[in-house]
């Protein structure tokens, strides 16, 4: 039996996006994000430097581009590859 719910990072991302949508970025606090995700603020800071990082994750764009390039049709030039949703 697990002591903690799995996927804390995913729950934090989901909670942050919901709160940003409902209240706006500026009005949302880390404490509110953590509470909605059922974790502590300390856990939030283990996954993110601050609340901006939830929106602008360093490797998110690189992951999207790598996935698009890996699944693109062979005859396309690199600049013609576009990510699919």
Image (spheres, rainbow, N blue to C red):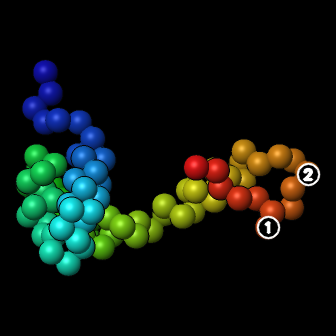
Q: What is the residue that sits farthest to the front in this orientation?
A: 22
Residue lying at 72% horizontally and 54% vertically, measured from the top left: 69
| Residue 50, visible in the rendered structure | no
- Kindly check if marks 2 and 1 are in contact, taking CB atoms under 8 A apart as contact: no
Residue 20 drawn at (x, y percent) = 25, 65
Mark 1: few, some, or many residues within 10 Å (few <14, many ≥20)? Answer: few
| Residue 84, visible in the rendered structure | yes
Q: In the figure, is residue 39 to the left or right of 80?
A: left
Q: How many marks?
A: 2
Label 2 to label 1: alpha-carbon separation: 12 Å
Residue 64 drawn at (x, y percent) = 58, 56
Q: What is the residue that sits farthest to the bottom in this orientation?
A: 26
Q: In the figure, is residue 24 to the left or right of 81?
A: left
Quarter assignment of residue 17:
bottom left
Question: Residue 26, which numbered label?
Answer: none
Residue 73 drawn at (x, y percent) = 83, 46
Tag 2 residue: 75
Quarter assignment of residue 48:
bottom left
Mark 2: few, some, or many residues within 10 Å (few <14, many ≥20)? Answer: few
Residue nearest the viewer, comparing 41 with 68: 68
Residue lying at 32% horizontally and 64% vertically, measured from the top left: 54
Residue lying at 81% horizontally and 63% vertically, measured from the top left: 80
Q: Secondary structure at mark 2?
A: loop
From this view, report whether residue 3 is shown above or below residue 33: above
Q: What is the residue that sits farthest to the top in this orientation?
A: 1
Q: In the figure, is residue 3 to the left or right of 14?
A: left
Residue 50 drawn at (x, y percent) = 24, 72
Question: Residue 79, which numbered label?
Answer: 1
Q: Secondary structure at mark 1?
A: helix
Looking at the rendered image, the quarter that the N terminus falls into is top left
């Amino acid at each position: 039996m697990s002591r903690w719910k799995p996927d804390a990072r995913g729950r934090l991302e989901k909670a942050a996006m919901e709160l940003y949508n409902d209240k706006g970025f500026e009005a949302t606090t880390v404490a509110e994000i953590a509470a909605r995700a059922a974790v502590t603020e300390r856990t939030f800071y283990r996954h993110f430097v601050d609340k901006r990082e939830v929106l602008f994750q360093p490797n998110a764009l690189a992951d999207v581009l790598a996935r698009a390039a890996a699944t693109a049709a062979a005859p396309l030039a690199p600049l013609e590859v576009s990510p699919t949703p």
